[in-house]
Amino acid sequence: MLVSIITPCFNPSLELIETIKSVQQQTYSNYEHIIIDDCSTSEVPDELLRAIESDPKIKFISRSWNAGPAVTRNRGISEAKGNFVAFLDADDLWHPSKLELQLNFMRENDVSISYTSYEVFDTKGKVVGVRTPPSRLGYNDILKSNQIGCLTAMYNVDMLGKVYMPNISKRQDMGLWLQILKTGTVAERCSDNPLARYRVGGNSVSSNKLGVLKYQWRIYREIERLSLPASIKYFGHYALRGLTRKV
């Protein structure tokens, strides 16, 4: 089974080399790593280019115009040849056994979409917490709170077909999960242990919590087309969780 790993980037730093290495160190080796540069305005560092060019499993795509993370990830999905699609942003990391454990879990249990727990670490490399989502999540659960970390998610293309993200600047990953789960599919956590590491701060596309609020509302009203009362209800759940979450 081939796994297609999608990594969007914009003005990437040398942190992307760490991300690439975390993929290269996977115990499961049948993958392709699709890195899409979203028309960066600065030169890609030579050291990073050498790391990309030296790995035949990496497919590097340079976009000719800046389109944002949703279109960029969707370009990666359209290029993917794998039986499974996984996501890893340019400043995040995977534990070495992530792909192997997740793929085995999905195949043995006939699961079409899965996710894992993950560590949260700061720009100095210090782990500041662990996010452990529930073992199973359905459509209504994700409406209340997007507890699937994009860096941990993987879906089965053979079972679901290629599913794309809505074209909004933020929360596009949540929109993708909702597209899959609204059919009655249930997403499952593949391991009790964290298998990925999420970097807070820096250039993370989801680091601005206040900035995502309007996109959360757009998910309810424009993407999912919920009624106003339902949108207010789920937005309240989302805001409460955001206020009470420590990491």
Image (cartoon, rainbow, N blue to C red):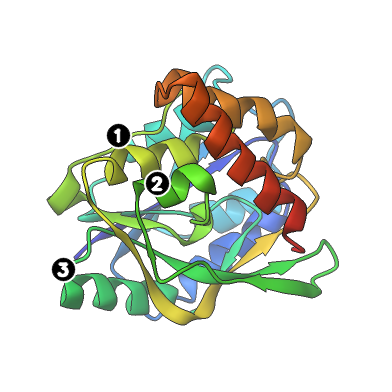
Query: Of the residues tagged 2 and 1, which is closer to the observer?
Result: 2
Which residue is tagged 1? 78
Name the quadrant of the C terminus.
bottom right
Residue 52 visible here: yes
- Secondary structure beneath label 2: helix
Query: Which residue does the image show at 72% across and 25% down from the upper left?
Result: 41
Residue type pointed to by label 1: Ser
Where is residue 157 shown, x and y percent of the image? Answer: 20, 49
User: Horizontal and vertical percent for residue 87?
Assistant: 45, 52
14 relative to 128, above or below: above
Look at mark 3 in the image and give the residue it sits on.
Answer: 110
Dots 2 and 1: beta carbons under 8 Å? no
Residue occupying image coordinates x 23% and y 58%: 112
SS assignment at label 1: helix
- The residue lying at 77 percent from left, 63 percent from top is 246
Residue 209: x and y in percent read: 74, 41
Q: Where residue 242 appears, x then y in whole percent?
A: 70, 50
Cα distance in 3D space between marks 2 and 1: 28 Å
Secondary structure at numbered mark 3: loop
Kind of residue at badge 2: Asn
Please name which of the two marks, 1 or 3, marks the residue nearer to the observer. 3
Could you tell whether 45 is left or right of 95 in the image? Answer: right
Spatial separation of the CA atoms under disc 1 and disc 3: 24 Å
Q: Nearer the viewer, residue 134 or 158?
A: 134
> For the image shown, how many numbered marks are present on the structure?
3
Q: Amino acid at mark 3?
A: Asp
Residue beneath disc 2: 140
Residue at the far right in the pictured view: 124
